[in-house]
């Protein structure tokens, strides 16, 4: 089994933002023919999803996250930092995903993309991709 690792940075510009990172992840996937790609964002106030990157949905992900965990809510963590909402949303959605690799490419469905969801920007985020297989 071969294992390859790639890390890249994503600069966010807004407090809430959705960014398609599929091409960066796919660049790492070409290291193997068949296996898996493990995508992990090294932060506690953003998340990674696999879904469609249609413009309306890219906004909907953020708007519904804000409805689920309102940023203006009462969070004990806000005594330290004003981002309690971001930690909670991130923990619900998750900071990693596993995607199959086939023929050196991510084996995603027709409309599926890998999307980073920012809940506490602007920041520079570090994404780690590990690809494993043959």
Image (cartoon, rainbow, N blue to C red):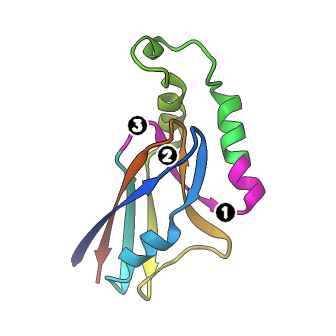
Where residue 47 is drawn, which disc sits there? Answer: 2
Task: Return the x and y of residue 53 as percentages of the image width and height.
Answer: 67, 63
In the rendered image, which residue does mark 1 sit on? 53
| Drawn side of residue 2 relative to residue 67, left or right | left
Q: Of marks 1 and 3, which one's residue comes earlier in the chain?
A: 3
Q: Residues within 10 Å of mark 3 (few under 14, many from 20)?
A: some
Identify which residue is drawn at 63% across, 60% down: 51
Report x, y in % for residue 64: 71, 38
> At 67% from the left edge and 63% from the top edge, which residue is drawn?
52
Q: Position of residue 104 (x, y in %)?
A: 41, 85
Q: Which of the two residues, 53 or 131, is positioned nearer the viewer here?
A: 53
Check residue 5 for magenta coloring: no
Would you place residue 123 above or below residue 4 in this image? above
The range drawn in magenta is: 43-59
User: What residue is pinned by disc 3?
Assistant: 44
Residue in front for this viewpoint, 113 or 83: 83
Question: Circle 3 sits in a helix, a strand or a loop, which is it?
Answer: loop
């Amino acid at each position: 089994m071969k294992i390859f690792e790639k890390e890249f940075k994503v600069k966010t510009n807004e407090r809430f933002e959705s960014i398609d990172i599929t091409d960066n992840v796919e660049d790492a996937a070409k290291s193997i023919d068949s296996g898996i790609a493990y995508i992990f964002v090294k932060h506690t106030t953003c998340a990674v999803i696999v879904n469609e990157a249609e413009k309306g949905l890219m906004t909907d992900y953020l708007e519904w996250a804000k409805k689920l965990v309102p940023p203006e809510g009462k969070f004990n963590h806000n005594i330290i930092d004003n981002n309690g909402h971001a930690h909670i949303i991130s923990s619900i959605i998750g900071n990693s995903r596993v995607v199959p690799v086939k023929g050196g490419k991510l084996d995603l469905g027709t409309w599926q993309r890998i999307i980073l969801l920012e809940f506490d920007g602007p920041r520079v985020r570090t994404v780690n991709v590990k690809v494993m297989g043959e």
